[in-house]
Amino acid sequence: MTLAQCRALCAAVTENEPMSARTTLKIGGPAELFALPCREEEMTALLRAAPDAAVIGNGSNLLVGDRGIRGLVICTAALRQITREGDCLVLAAGAPLPRAANFALECGLAGLEFCGGIPGTAGGALCMNAGAYDGEMADVVVSSRYAEGGQTRAETDHAFAYRRSVYTDNPRRAVLSVTLRLAEGDKAAIGAKMESIAAKRRERQPLDRPSAGSAFRRPGSRAAAELIESCGLKGAAVGGAQVSEKHAGFIINRGGATCEDVKRLLALVGETVLRETGVALEPEIKMMGE
Ligand SMILES: Cc1cc2nc3c(=O)[nH]c(=O)nc-3n(C[C@H](O)[C@H](O)[C@H](O)COP(=O)(O)OP(=O)(O)OC[C@H]3O[C@@H](n4cnc5c(N)ncnc54)[C@H](O)[C@@H]3O)c2cc1C
C-alpha cells in the first residue's frame, strides 16, 4: 500500500513513524506507514485494503524491533468513545482502560476497578485478557465486534485463558469495540477499591520508568518476579535494559535501550531462572517487527 492510497482512506497517516514514540517501553524503529484512524469507518477501510496490517493500541505490552515494522501499522488510540447502555459500557477499541474505570466509577458501576492502573486500550486489553488484583477482562466482557479483512462481525465466545483470547489466536482480527457488563455498586466503595489498587501499584511497580509491565507470564503458583528475585537478578542489565530494582518482574528502559538489549536480557533471565529453579519462563511482552 502506498502513502497516497492510505491517505485516501484515513486522514492521519505518516511515513517512517518512530515506534519508540508509540510504545511505553520507548523502543522500536520506524513503521513504514502509520495510520491513526479517528472514525471506525477509516479503520475498517484500511483493513479492507491491507488485511495484514498490524494493529496496536497504546503499545503498553509491545517490544518493537530496532529496524521497525514493514507495511502498515494501525493505531486505535484516537478511537476513544465510551457509552453507557444500562449496566453495560461499550468501549471503542482505543478507549483507555483507566478512563473506562473512571467512567464506571462516575456511573456507580462496579467491576472495572481492577483495570484503573493498566495503561492499555480496550482492544489491547481484550486481546491480552488483561487482569490484575483478582480481576480480568474475562469477568466483564460480554461481546465484541471485530473486522477481519473486508468483514465486520460480532463475537461472544472469546476463549479466554490467562493473558490470552480468541484475538491472540487470530491476529488478523482487529477489535473495533468491546461491551462490558458491570453491576450497580456504591460509588464510595468503588472509589476506595480503585485507590487501594493504585496505592499498591505505586508502592510496588516502577511507574516512573518506561516498561511494558510484567515481562514474563506467571509460570504457575509462584510469580515470575519472585523467581527472578530469588536468582539475584534484580538490577541485572544488558545495555539500557534493566531488571527493575523495585519489581523484578518488570524490565525497564533506563535510557537508550534497544530491542536487542531487551531480548538479550529476557534470554539471560530466562536461562538463569531455568538453571537455578528448573522453571521455564515465557515472555508476556508481544514482539512486533524486525
Ligand atoms: C506500567 C504497566 C503496568 C501494567 N500492568 C498490567 C496489569 O496489571 N495487567 C495486565 O494484564 N497488563 C498490564 N500491563 C500490560 C498492558 O498494559 C496490557 O497488556 C494492555 O492490555 C495492553 O493494551 P495496549 O492497548 O497497550 O495493547 P498493545 O500493547 O498496543 O498491543 C498488545 C497486543 O494486543 C494487540 N491489539 C491491540 N489492539 C488491538 C485491537 N484493537 N484488535 C486486535 N488486537 C489488538 C496487539 O496487536 C498486540 O498483540 C502493564 C503495562 C505497563 C506499562
Image (spheres, rainbow, N blue to C red):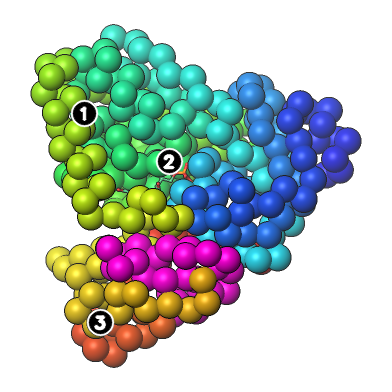
The disc placed on residue 232 is 3
Q: How many marks?
A: 3
**Side of 164 where 58 appears, left or right:** right
Q: Is mark 1 within 8 Å of ligand 1?
A: no
Residue 138 at x, y percent in the picture: 28, 39
The quarter of the picture where residue 188 lies is top left
Give the labeled residue for mark 1. 111
Q: At x 26% / y 13%, what residue is drawn?
A: 107
Is residue 180 something one can see in this rendering? no
Q: Nearer the viewer, residue 248 or 178?
A: 248
Is residue 273 something one can see in this rendering? yes
Q: At x 30% / y 79%, what residue is drawn?
A: 233
Gap between marks 2 and 3, in whole Å? 30 Å
Give the labeled residue for mark 2. 120
Count neighbours of disc 3 (C-alpha within 10 A) and say few if under 14, some if 14 to 19, many if 20 or more: few
Residue 189 at x, y percent in the picture: 11, 23
Q: Is mark 2 within 8 Å of ligand 1?
A: yes
